Amino acid sequence: MRNKKIAGAIGVLALTLCCFSCKEFLTVEPVDRLTGNNFYRSIDDVESNVANMYSMFFDKINEGWIMGGIGEARSGEIIASPGANGYSARRVVEVLGENDLLYAMDPSAPWEWYHYERVTNWTRYYQVIQTANILVNKLEEGIPGVSDVDKQRYIAEATFMRCFAYWWMVRLYGDVVYYTTPYNAESLPREGMVSVLNKCIADLKPHKDNMPWAHADPALKGARASRGSIIALLMHMNMWNAGFDRNNREGYFREVASLGTELIQSNTYRLYPLTEEGWSTVMKGRSDESLFEFYRSINYQDNNAALSPFGDHFLRWPYKFPRFNNQISHCYYIDTYMARLYPSAVADKRADFWFEDMLSNSGQFIAVKFAFNVYASGNEDRNPDNTFLIFRYPDAILLHAEALAELARDNEAIASLNMIRERAEATPYGGGGGQELKDFIFWERCRELFGEGHRYFDLVRTQRIMNPTFARNPLNSDQYNRRAWTWPIDPSARNNNPRMVLNEYWLTR
């Protein structure tokens, strides 16, 4: 029966998702008022265009429980809570954990309203890329009222968003179609992901110093790209390539170590204390800990989908409303994983401060990490008023530590690692160097970045996804090499593009 459902899902995917296709492949139709030749007449037009790029990208991660589905659930530690509101639908988290993406997208399954088939459609990302390409082109031609300093800053910001979209797609799909021309109509093949990211690194790095460390307007902090955002993205792209371009990994690690040192020594960013006031500020957004985020606030009547915040699945009343159908959390993390993250014998304030009933193996589990900005609400289904964090300062510090450890610069790696543990009031790392240190840094990223969408991608890029010590449902080497860690690609990507191929693993399994 289930095989028939999966076969049906493939057919429906091929038939129904084509409605998302464009008139020409990669000739993406952008929002008319933001891309026409008559639009770029002032700096206000540029600002509107930049704001639209961020908004278009957020549209994709607001389509459902995306942050949880792509970056957290696929490693298998999340279980639906029996008796929770919508229990049958919530069990999709377990299907994701088994890497059964075709079943997760099955429209006949009880979780069809999660719409994971939308993850396979990359059109919106290419709209962001094309909008960035056109903006760069228009800025280079010259726009009235835009000074040379502002021109370079806007080009840097548009280049950041272009490279950010490519990096995001690489992690989802592997090889992608790469182009930077403003109006592309040529049929292009997919390009190897390492090559794409190397081109992005070469594209973005020269613009780094054209961006300010901090914006003059504090309302833009974290919510708009800065030099810190660019450094964080460059670090992530280098670390991804280090995992797949292993003959050149030392060069990538050296680059990450240098970028991390530059970021730390800038003294622009800081770690907030783990107090209610400190952590609520981080989660609210626009803090000194944010390198990049999609700032969303109920005070601005932002239209967040009820399902989209990560914390939605791990909060219950009184942290999530309404009370009558949120008596227990929708899902929980299994106790063996949580005990591995926060051993009872090791001091770590995060274990108590960020969680309630952490080892309950039931809907009593609460990720209080995402519950510090609760506001009064009646019977409306609302989550706490948090931002969507993408790059946070501790993420970059731990990438710095990881790269240093890989370069056998153990003392420096431990110093960066202990910056994070000190803020967590955790026992400082006192172990040895080498693999012991590298593994500890990996687990520290799991601890510190819990629920922020990094875990699964860290497993993939470090190849720990094949090791049951680190992943509950590991891939075997054949699955890994055939890229079972990717998502399927919407068949509409082949429309009018004879050079396009889909992800082979999801066509032949």
Image (tube, helix red, strand yellow):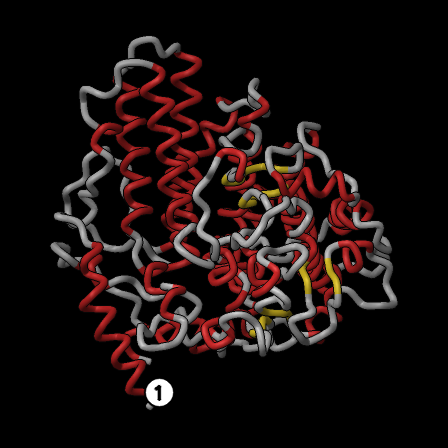
Residue 51 occupies which quadrant of the picture? Answer: top left
Q: Position of residue 98 (x, y in %)?
A: 48, 77
Q: Quadrant of the C terminus?
A: bottom left
Residue lying at 63% horizontally and 43% vertically, measured from the top left: 283
Give left or right: position of 190 versus 422. left
Give left or right: position of 408 versus 380. right
Residue 15 occupies which quadrant of the picture? Answer: bottom left
At label 1, counting other C-alpha atoms closer than 10 Å, the crowd grade (few under 14, some 14-19, many 20 or more) is few
Give left or right: position of 124 versus 224. left
Residue lying at 54% horizontally and 76% vertically, measured from the top left: 474
Q: Nearer the viewer, residue 32 or 202?
A: 32
Residue lying at 11% horizontally and 54% vertically, measured from the top left: 496
Indicate the amino acid at tag 1.
Answer: Arg
Q: Nearer the viewer, residue 238 or 171?
A: 171
Q: Nearer the viewer, residue 144 or 404?
A: 144
What residue would you read off at disc 1?
Answer: 2
Q: Position of residue 294 (x, y in %)?
A: 50, 40
Residue 462 visible, this angle: no
Q: Residue furthest bottom?
A: 1
Residue 408 visible, this angle: yes
Residue 326 occupies which quadrant of the picture? Answer: bottom right
- Across the whole image, how many numbered discs are drawn on residues? 1
210 versus 106 height, above or below: above
